[in-house]
Image (cartoon, rainbow, N blue to C red):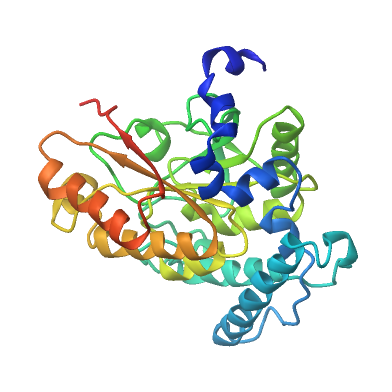
Amino acid sequence: MLMWRILRRDAIEVLYDERARSSLARYFAVMNDEKPAKFMIAKRLPAEFDVDEPLESLWAKHEKLTEDFYRIQGEIDSERISLEDMVAPEKSYLDLKIAIANRILERCHFCNRRCGVNRLRGELGYCRCGTQITVSSIFEHIGEEPELVPSGTIFTMGCTIRCLHCQNWTISQWFESGEVYSPRRLALAVEGLRKGGCRNANLVGGEPTPWLEQWLETFKHVNVNIPVVWNSNSYYSEETAKLLAGFVDVYLLDFKYGPFDCAKRISDAPNYWDVCARNHLYGNKYGELIIRVLVLPNHLECCTKHILKWIADNLGRNTRTNVMFQYRP
């Protein structure tokens, strides 16, 4: 467990980096148990709803509760109230998210493809994900960004895009069988990662997006304070972005391609630029951001430069951005 302190001295140094602490102030506070993770607040925020009411009605209630959530988070962060003062309700904001996500499974549109399959009836869409979250591996990762190391990483099967250069092809395209987890069992695994010294729960794959309903249900049963890191390709729907608000602490988002057809040609991801940009704006509004930009050969002008300019113009020059040079053909 302590090997990371030797191999990743930057993971210690980042704790004293003023720019990192400014960009990820709340994350560091949750990591140090000085503030509660968003999912813990969501479990204490009362919600009145019926799971059978129209989806539009559930969304309207969710929108109002999202406003309430961030107001209450502000009061908790400023120590005007404490989480312990909030009694666990019969139904919570997190329960409402689960109810909406379950309805989405009936006509799946967690990602931007909006396949519309009924996963509750066994239909499979582009990602080939069913209703039982399937895990490739769970471990302490010491290869992530220094502020995340050691990271409690959970790799789930399936993906919403198909990158020709994917490093996790066997996971994303189901060449592994994986292992099915119940939400309660996965919650115990998350708790074990935290108790073992991991700084966060890093939800990755493949891609975590197809499993959002199961992730929400998992964290309903997590009883330790741990920051949630959403490690995504950014190709998720606006509905997913809304459900992530008030749940995710750190958005660890890829920004893969510029505003041309590169995403469609290389990753089968039409309209990637617009979707990705929107989701980065959501992440910046509702949580804290770390952005990954993988530099691809011959894509400096069409992709990398456009991405970095967009980040600087729309999110600010102090946004935590990891420009990566680890492409392998």
To which quarter of the image does residue 68 belong? Answer: bottom right
Q: Residue at x 38, y 31 (%)?
A: 170
Q: Position of residue 195 (x, y in %)?
A: 77, 32
Q: Is residue 182 visible?
A: no
Residue at x-position 43% and y-position 35%: 171
Which residue is drawn at the image coordinates 65% and 35% (left, top)?
199
Residue 71 lies, in percent from the top left, at 68, 73
Question: Which quadrant: the N terminus?
Answer: top right
**Residue 209 located left or right of residue 185:** left
Residue in the foreground of this view, choosing between 250 and 48: 250
Q: From what the image shows, is residue 125 above or below residue 117?
A: above
The location of residue 154, given as percent across then percent down, is 57, 37
Foreground residue, 253 or 21? 21
Up-down: is 153 above or below 264?
A: above
- Tell me the quarter of the image containing the C terminus: top left
- State the image quarter where residue 186 is shown: top right
Counting from the top left corner in percent of width and height, residue 304 is at: 20, 45
Left or right of 281? Residue 220 is right
Q: Which quadrant holds residue 325?
A: top left
